[in-house]
Amino acid sequence: MKLAVIKETREGEKRVSLTPQIVKQLVGKGYEILVESGAGDLSSFQDKDYVTAGASIEPSKTTLFAQADVVVKINPLTPEEIKSCKPSTITMSLMYHLTNTEMVGMLAAQGVTSFSMDAIPRISRAQSMDVLSSQSNLAGYKAVILGAEHMTRIFPLMMTSAGTITPSKVLIFGIGVAGLQAIATAKRLGAVVEATDVRPETKEQAESLGDKFITVADDGIKTEGGYAKEVTPEYLAKQKEAVNKSLFQADLVITTALVMGRKAPTLITEEQVKQMKFGSVIIDMAVEQGGNCELSELNKVVVKHGVKIVGIENLPSSLATNASELYAKNVMNLLVHLSDKSGFKWDMEEEITKGTLIVHNGKNLK
């Protein structure tokens, strides 16, 4: 089976879908790997590294699509890439199929089969394939580092001959994978950390890392398939009231709240920003889906009412080497689960297959 690693074309994307280390393991399992020339450059993986690992380098994207049985990417395929696919092609990438319905329709019209790396079910045996978790982990770390870059103060308590510097106060909205890593990173740097989430079951997870959980006087909301569901306006109002004191005292606020297939919920309004500390910083990790802060702007750093609001998307790409390594491992684990060197198993009722298979032989399954 021939796998083609396609160079990412999304603006600002530095990751690559398979790394030389994973290529070597897949070649050892009997897969043949073709890599578009330069695909790994921005992740610090050179063509010669792939050749050493057993891959073939191909300068022509057209030739890659013509030869490939499986096309592996990170970002969704572009219309041009979809048109280059043979009807028998199998694609593996992030798809975000709930919001990219036009792309799914194009894939179906082309007659291909597509697996979505962002649709891995949240079950224990699929953890090693969970791209959203692996990438969110890195994003949570990077959000804190980005906050440190934009803040005008340090995180830890520091006692000096000139006096004592009190630790910074950090508030984190959302205790998923990104939020937990943000808590852990901020704590390691010495900050006083508080966090809140609509899911009451996250309280224990947050407190296990040493932060204070802000409780909302409500039953909260349960999850569905490991993902948070949309909450009511009434609940958001209660959450807003509960967190305002901490929000207005925070030096750094990190928001991570997402709802699968929907616009991100607004957690910080302009009126709240007006009451925040002058010089405080918001890192809005949900900016690509509309933002958790009402004043966030995509891929911009803006100052509103004395608060710096950072709306940079795709934080994992800024840690391209590690992000690519984790993504590649996720892809390999899913690929080995779904197939062997002779082909795919097509167990259509198996939970992981059923969850990730979006288009099959030109038929939209979702």
Image (spheres, rainbow, N blue to C red):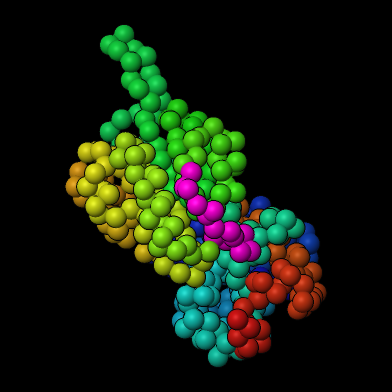
Residue farthest toward the top in the current orientation of the protein = 161
Measuring 41% from the left and 25% from the top, which residue is drawn there?
A: 156
The N terminus appears in which quarter of the rendering? bottom right
Residue 20 in percent (x, y) is at 63, 55
Q: Nearer the viewer, residue 356 or 220?
A: 220
Measuring 51% from the left and 86% from the top, which residue is drawn there?
A: 106
**Residue 23 visible in the picture:** no
**Vertical order, 168 against 73 (above or below):** above
**Vertical order, 151 against 79 (above or below):** above
Measuring 56% from the left and 36% from the top, which residue is drawn there?
A: 207
Say how many tags the image has: 0
Which of the 4 image quarters holds residue 237? bottom left
184 vs 334, left or right, is left
Measuring 62% from the left and 78% from the top, which residue is drawn there?
A: 358
Residue 220 in percent (x, y) is at 52, 54
Residue 208 in percent (x, y) is at 60, 36
**Residue 200 visible in the picture:** yes
Q: Nearer the viewer, residue 131 or 239?
A: 239
Residue 107 in percent (x, y) is at 55, 84
87 vs 257, left or right, is right
Residue farthest toward the left in the current orientation of the protein = 305
Q: Nearer the viewer, residue 3 or 340?
A: 340
Q: Nearer the viewer, residue 86 or 265?
A: 265
**Vertical order, 240 against 104 (above or below):** above
Q: Is residue 359 magenta?
A: no
Q: Main secondary structure of the magenta part?
A: loop
The C terminus appears in which quarter of the rendering? bottom right
Which of the 4 image quarters holds residue 364? bottom right
Magenta range: 215-228
Q: Is residue 216 magenta?
A: yes
